[in-house]
Amino acid sequence: MSRDHVLHRIRTATGRSAGQPCAEAPAPLLQIPGVDMQARIQMFAQAIESLAGKFHRAPTPEAARAYAAALIPETGAIASPAPLLADCGITQLPGVETGITERRALRAACARAGLGITSADYALADTGTLVMLSSPREARMISLLPPVHLAVVSAANLLTGLDELFTVLPDPAAATSAMVLITGPSRTADIEQILVRGVHGPGEIHVVLV
Amino acid sequence: MDPSLDRNFSKTIGNAALQEAIYSATGRLVEKRRSALPAPAVFESWREQARLVKQHTLENLDHYLERLEANLTARGAKVVYARGGGEVADYLAGLAKEKEARLVVKSKSMTTEEIHLNGLLEDARLEVVETDLGEFIVQLARERPYHIVAPALHKTRYDVADLFTRTLNVERENLPEKQTKIARRVLREKFLAADIGVTGANFLVAESGAIVLVENEGNARLSSSAPRVHVAIAGIEKVIPRAQDLAVFLKLLGRSATGQPLTVYTSYLSGPRRAGELDGPDELHLVLLDNGRTKLLADRNKREALYCIRCGACLNHCPVYRKIGGHHYPWVYSGPIGAVITPHFMGIHEEPWLPYASSLCGACAEVCPVKIDLPGALLKLRQETVKAEVGGVHGRWERLAFRFWAWLMCRPRLYEMAGLMISMLSRDREGAGWMRSAPWLMNFGPLRAWSAGRDLPPPPGRSFRAMWRARLKSGKGD
């Protein structure tokens, strides 16, 4: 009822009639700079560090596993069942819980764990951003509830920035119910504009590029 | 929580601590924004593009809303429309009853502030908890947000310490870091127990069918993903055509609001959890709110006020906002954008002074990421206020005064004599450089109302005309 009322008011205000075709929207403004991989990695590392995140380049899967192993706290870690994490041998590390598929149990495990380990579908070099697509292999909560987040990213998926992301993925809804861009640790400046990290999400973020 | 106007400006202007809080916080936001801007030509191309996209979408708003609805519905979300706050509250109350829900967690949303949703839901016996740190603080203090982006901008850490000890029954902590930890602990329990999560929306993507949330703390992610039911409440003007348009809007919003190239979290939500996905809500509802927006849409002169992406940059740069703060504005939207949109929602008869709460310096338009002509809109509002004669007797006196002024300006000799007279009558006797009290002839009737709140610089010893004549005589004038 309100639907028809509101749409009618909109049409009256804009002088349109129901079902009237719409002119083409202005072409999107997307500019992808040409940046080679070496420069991309450098940019990415710099952006993450400027956000108080930790960047680590792992030449081999074993090196990624060693980095992860050193981070696992006494409270344990929870890892998503992502192929990249299994390939690196991270899901098999002692103290790492993985493979929980029941939602409530998964949420409880994330709330308990001192470290959340995920992969990332893409990363953006210029802003130091992780692009996470929710799927059967990646949960929304693992990168959110634990106080520390470790993300392992394949260098092949390192994009220059937002413009390239929306070129590679013109419609994220086709791939997932939830795409989340993560740029640094959770933060606030709500009290006196003073920066505090780790409000509701992780206060510490580690990114390993393999 | 009282939405009515507090005209006692001196309460804010005379409070040195509050002045310092507002001035330094907005100053830091101005500085952060400036340091995050790209080359001027690049920034200008983003602004121009954002403006074009908003203009196009609003001209075809019914089309894009129908596309949005069709795409979201196809992925299992429910889309409803609401004319005003009452309908939003009724819908939520009905939903809560159906789900046997008691606890609602909310992430920061100006749209829900605008309809006083919390009060309406509390009337329906629901517990509503604000989860953005700033909103949590103002909710505990039972106030309304001071600023579009920084709701607790007026509170010092000591105010927060007092508030937390009084309302949360915790040890007193003066450090923002410790205070944030307290809020995290209290709110984490609420997130895990909540039945419904309510959020606003920064953007709605029509061709994809998606709700976009932009934030730094993670509370919008939690509100939209932890409870079984997620309800997003958004103004109808939030829609944009494609996901690809976000590239420009996200770059503009983060930089303009807090000087971040990208905020910490950007969520792109296109429906409830899909088969096989590990978590996410079972249900997603989108409430599309009118609440006066179609009235603004019909006003061709000021329609562009609907382009606003709520970054708050115009507040931070406004000399009036930086002096009087956010609580003297009659509605939840303060600063220049508040002064422009409020009359459409409340009527110009309610607060005729509002369009005058601006020096028309133009700083707001210069920083606006979607290039809204805010000073132009304020001028038009002034015209409408005068035409509607809501100014009453002042309007008549003012017209008379200006007619006299025009008459005088056309008569050079008379003008010069009048100037000489005023200058003689108003010598700066105290030598303070400013006249603390107006000369007797400015101290009666409507003039008194005008001069009561203003200091005047004393007129100079020699008038411009006298100096000009002397210059001509000495032969330097050509």
Image (cartoon, coloured by chain):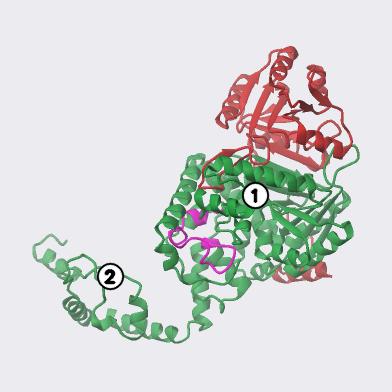
Chain colours: A red, B green
Q: Nearer the viewer, residue B447 or A162?
A: B447
Residue A187 visible in the shown view: yes
Task: Write the start and end of the magenta stretch as one range.
Answer: B312-337
Q: Mark 1 lies on which chain?
A: B
Q: Is residue B231 left or right of residue B215?
A: right
Q: Against B464, is B145 above or below?
A: above
State if disc 2 and disc 1 touch (CB < 8 Å): no
Mark linked to residue B107? none
Q: Does the magenta stretch include residue B324?
A: yes
Q: Where is residue B26 in the image (x, y as percent from the top left)?
A: 47, 51
Mark 1, other Cα within 10 Å: few <14 / some 14–19 / many ≥20: many
Question: How much space separates mark 1 and mark 2, taking CA atoms?
Answer: 45 Å
Q: Quadrant of residue A63?
A: top right
Q: Residue at x 52, y 39 (%)?
A: B38
Q: Where is residue B72 in the image (x, y as percent from the top left)?
A: 83, 52
Q: Against B439, is B44 above or below?
A: above
Q: Is residue B336 left or right of residue B200?
A: left
Q: Quadrant of the C terminus of chain B?
A: bottom left
The residue singled out by tag 1 in the image is: B132
